[in-house]
Image (tube, helix red, strand yellow):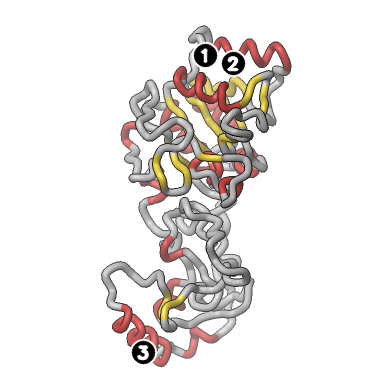
Amino acid sequence: MTNVLWLQGGACSGDTMSFLNGEDPTACDLIADFGIKILWHPSLGLEMGTNLQTLLWECILGKTPLDILVFEGTVVNAPNGTGEWNRFADRPMKQWLEDLAKAANFVVAIGDCATWGGIPAMSPNPSESQGLQFLKRKKGGFLGEDFISKGGLPVINIPGCPAHPDWISQILVAIATGRISDIALDELHRPQTFFNTFAETGCTRNIHFAYRATTTEFGDRKGCLFYDLGCRGPMTHSSCNRILWNGVSSKTRAGMPCIGCTEPEFPFHDLKPGTVFKTQTIMGVPKEIPPGVNPKDYAVFTVVAKDSAPKWTDEDFFLV
């Protein structure tokens, strides 16, 4: 039996909703087939008041083994580092989190808020929010850059706004079955099995990207979403087009640009108003050109590619 405690800090519950909508496996499958026991979850837990506090203290004191501590949402430190803006079970949430992280065999951060700070950590960050082990791309976060869980790993980061349910469940299963050591983490502590490729991998519009056959309409069934709508698929580490949402679709397949929600910089609030869905350029050339490519050569290539695009790139068809 693998004991899982799921807590929530400064969050919208989006990752919980994503997790509870998972289909393969479902949350029930995790319990029935993989021996995962949910000690407590903000949407599922039955304990309240004194009973909940007793459960938490038993985990901290080792009376109840804590195999996995899952945290969703930011660590709220306001005001003035006290954490009083986010109280839970008669203490600031950050105090529970600090004690429970020391007791847990593994700590898993779910969603952008728990991994990098997400939207709440945007400047000026009045809630003094941060992720468990990062603040945006800067390592450190609430637990500090040297934090290592009892199981020998740093915080396992599963970003996304929200995180894909399959990413969450598969990491929980990997820990429960003793296979977590087989999954390498990248420099941002993300499991490489999900985040070692870019979101454009598997995108059904890749051929349009190659020919610079663009679209300017959201929901359009043809054309690349990068050049005019600012799709961040080519520079966002994610498997959304390999592991489809609900096993069916993704943002780009539905005609919506990737917004880069698995990267620490999300939600890219440094952009000028009105430019979120517009590719950022330098002298007409996208800033995010492929690594190692000369900007002038890239500009020439894109002109040639667009001129040589076959007729079918402008035809209307359904993407499957």
Q: Crowding near pointer 2: few (<14 within 10 Å), some, many (20+)?
A: many
Report, in whole angstroms, how far the alpha carbon at label 1 lies from the one at label 2. Answer: 6 Å
Residue type, mark 2 in image: Leu
49, above or below 292, in the image = above
Amino acid, disc 1: Ile
Kindly state the secondary structure of the residue where label 3 is placed.
Answer: helix
Label 3 – label 1 distance at C-alpha? 63 Å
Q: Secondary structure at mark 2?
A: helix
Q: Which residue is mark 2?
A: 56
Q: Would you name the residue on which mark 1 appears?
A: 60
The structure residue drawn at horizontal position 47% and vertical position 48%, both measured from the top left corner, is 136
Along the horizontal axis of the image, is 212 left or right of 304?
A: right
**Labels 1 and 2 touching (C-beta < 8 A):** yes
Relative to residue 309, is residue 108 depicted above or below? above
Q: Residue at x 69, y 12 (%)?
A: 51
Residue under numbered circle 3: 304
